[in-house]
Amino acid sequence: MRKQKPVANSFVIMTELVLPNDTNTLNNLMGGRMMHLMDIAAAISAQKHSNRIVVTASVDNVSFRDSIRLGNVVTLQAQVTRAFSSSMEVHIDVWAEDIPSGTKMKTNEAFFTFVAVDQAGRPIDVPEAIPETDEEIRLYDGALRRRQLRLVLAGRMQPAEAQELKALFALE
């Protein structure tokens, strides 16, 4: 039987200040810099869950809702949603805060997938993720569909084999 860990144990909060070197000519945080920060926060979350070295396997649909401005404080929250044999899905929310004005808004959201590896870089088993709150259960339940979609889009699974996706669209 696989070891089990609550998904809450993988929760990570990372905070950064947007400085001039992080911005484009409009004084907004560059998208590549945002993805870099998201990758770090998500990797730490996956490492906390697996207690292993992890590598990024995929990034799903990074949504850029609002600009993050020079001087904003960026808070990233990451948590494993589900673990498969050696891979883990991590959900990330990003918030931008303008401290002088007292405003805070959610600006980005994404799902990253990481694979735990041994010292030789070979995939290694990870603990099962156990959701406890309603939100953790909701994300856990959707993770298998998101995984199948990733695999189909990557050409690693035939659409006919994606049973969770077929059920979602009531395809026969």
Image (spheres, grey):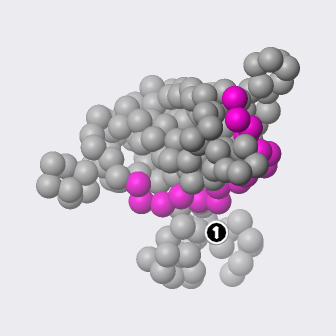
Asked whether residue 88 is in view, the answer is yes
On the image, the x and y values in percent for residue 75 come to 63, 29
62 in the magenta segment: yes
The outermost residue toward the left is 120
In which quadrant is the C terminus drawn?
A: bottom right
Q: Report the quarter where the N terminus lies.
A: top left
Which residue is pictured at 74% across the width and 26% down the height? 97
Percent of width and height locating residue 67:
77, 45
Q: Nearer the viewer, residue 137 or 18?
A: 18
Give coordinates of residue 92: x percent, y percent.
Answer: 59, 41
Q: Is residue 11 above or below residue 171?
A: above
Magenta stretch: give its range.
56-71
Residue 70, above or below 142: above
Residue displayed at 79% across by 45% down: 66
Residue at the spot 74% in from the left edge and 72% down from the top edge: 170
Question: Which amino acid lies under the numbered mark 1 shown in the image of this protein?
Answer: Leu
Locate residue 57, reporting x and y percent. Answer: 42, 59
Q: Is residue 16 magenta?
A: no
Estimate how packed mark 1 is, as few (under 14), some (14 to 19) or many (20 or more) residues with alpha carbons within 10 Å: some
- In the picture provided, is 144 more to the left or to the right than 52? right
Residue under the point 19% across and 49% down: 118
Q: How many marks?
A: 1
Q: Secondary structure at mark 1?
A: helix
Residue named by callout 1: 165
Camera-nearest residue between 132 and 74: 74
